[in-house]
Amino acid sequence: MEKFKVKDVSLASKGQLQIEWASKHMPVLNQIKEKFQKEKPLKNLTLGACLHVTKETAVLVETFLAGGAKVALCGSNPLSTQDDVAAALAEKGVNVFAWRAQTTEEYYWCIEQVINHKPVITLDDGADLVGTIHNKRTEALSNIKGGTEETTTGVLRLRAMEKTGELKYAIIAVNDAYTKYLFDNRYGTGQSTIDGILRATNILLAGKNFVVCGYGWCGKGIAMRAQGMGANVIITEVNPLRALEAAMNGFRIMPIAEAAKIGDIFVTATGDISVIRKEHMQKMKDGAILANSGHFNVEINMKELEELAVSKRTIRPNLEEYTLKDGRKLYLLAEGRLVNLASAEGHPSEVMDMSFANQALSIEYLAKNEKMPPKVYEVPREVDETVARLKLNAMKIKIDELTEEQKRYLATWEMGTI
């Protein structure tokens, strides 16, 4: 059985510096790490994780190690691994299988190696690990107690599995915790997506028509940050409630077919397939930039873009130029993969602090409790509130508490207007 596979183990010292920098900005997870160090709630448990291998993920892994767990880890995207961090984790004894710029075959090989280590609890970012276990490696199911899922896309896939009766073990939807999606999806995705676009292109956003496809929590964050940079933000949506909310927030709303004609920059954040298609690309102006911030590289129809192009060349890292038959040029960022991780470094450590605190406490919850029926569960309310309180304490923010009178008032119905 393979122990690890990374690009270059000599990068470990550089990666350790990155991990230390992230840790400095993750006070909540560090408090949990200290607790785990004392209590060892994960002693002798093997965790199998398919997550973006970043410096922040490394701090989470260190927390699990402190709790007594063994960890097998692979990347959840072929372009998101930070090779120096992967090397540092390998040096710490983590069974890590990850390197940047994997082929699809290599990506799934790494997932298979994690499964080979016989995890008792899984952590997923997009549900590829869970999907592989259920489709190809069903013999691993008997050993698994439960798992967690961190993305909107992954939760959608798992709920679909639950609905059809195909989900075979309990999954806690970390993505749906308030202290995850309200902050990670909105502030994290918003900032890191803009960061990825700027690193790949170095363009000025002010004055540009910036089209955001999807106004979920990730789309809201991207729109908010693009607007803050001076862009003219246009939202495309299929959900009438989200479209109405975007309109009330001051954004222009229109179908993608109309936005295609005037957009300068297009960012998808829907979790669905073929959001930007051939008929949209044919209407785009010369020089339009296409980027994706959804988990999988399916939101921009790559096959149709390739078919429309007569030539392709790489202009700079993560920036490819597609020349169409009529001479127009469209620019694709990060191969249509997660632009915030492929072109930048993913979410800032401060916001991942809360997301990964939810991961750590949810894993502890699964470890301490009896095996639950196979379905998708919400993060326990006490976990969500604990993470929020720890974060407030770390930020040195104090809040009020209900008086006994106020508690009684909220708990009864008799008292109305006085």
Image (cartoon, rainbow, N blue to C red):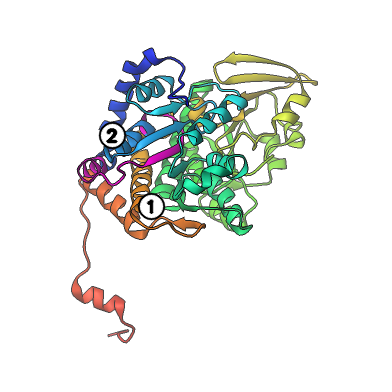
Q: Measured along the vertical axis of the image, is residue 176 above or below residue 408?
A: above
Q: Earlier in the sequence, mark 2 or mark 1?
A: 2
Q: Residues within 10 Å of mark 1 (few under 14, many from 20)?
A: many
Question: Going 69% across and 46% down the picture, which residue do you hit?
Answer: 255
Q: Which label is found at residue 366?
A: 1
Question: Going 30% across and 85% down the picture, which residue do you hit?
Answer: 415
Instruction: Tell me the kind of residue under disc 1.
Output: Leu
Q: Residue 186 location, x and y as percent?
A: 45, 44
Q: Which residues are magenta?
A: 31-56
Q: Specify whether 170 is left or right of 333.
A: left
Q: Which residue is mark 2?
A: 25
Whether label 2 touches label 1, CB < 8 Å: no
Question: Going 71% across and 41% down the picture, which residue do you hit?
Answer: 258
Element type at marker 1?
helix
Q: Is residue 33 magenta?
A: yes
- Quadrant containing the C terminus is bottom left
Q: Measured along the vertical axis of the image, is residue 32 above or below residue 4?
A: below
Q: Residues within 10 Å of mark 2 (few under 14, many from 20)?
A: some
Q: Residue 206 location, x and y as percent?
A: 51, 30
Calculate the distance from the C-alpha at mark 2 to the C-alpha at mark 1: 27 Å
Q: Specify whether 96 is left or right of 30.
A: right
Question: Going 62% across and 43% down the picture, which residue do you hit?
Answer: 135
Where residue 43 sits, quadrant-wise, is top left
Where residue 83 sits, quadrant-wise, is top left
Element type at marker 2?
loop
Q: Residue 99 location, x and y as percent?
A: 49, 22
Tell how many labels.
2
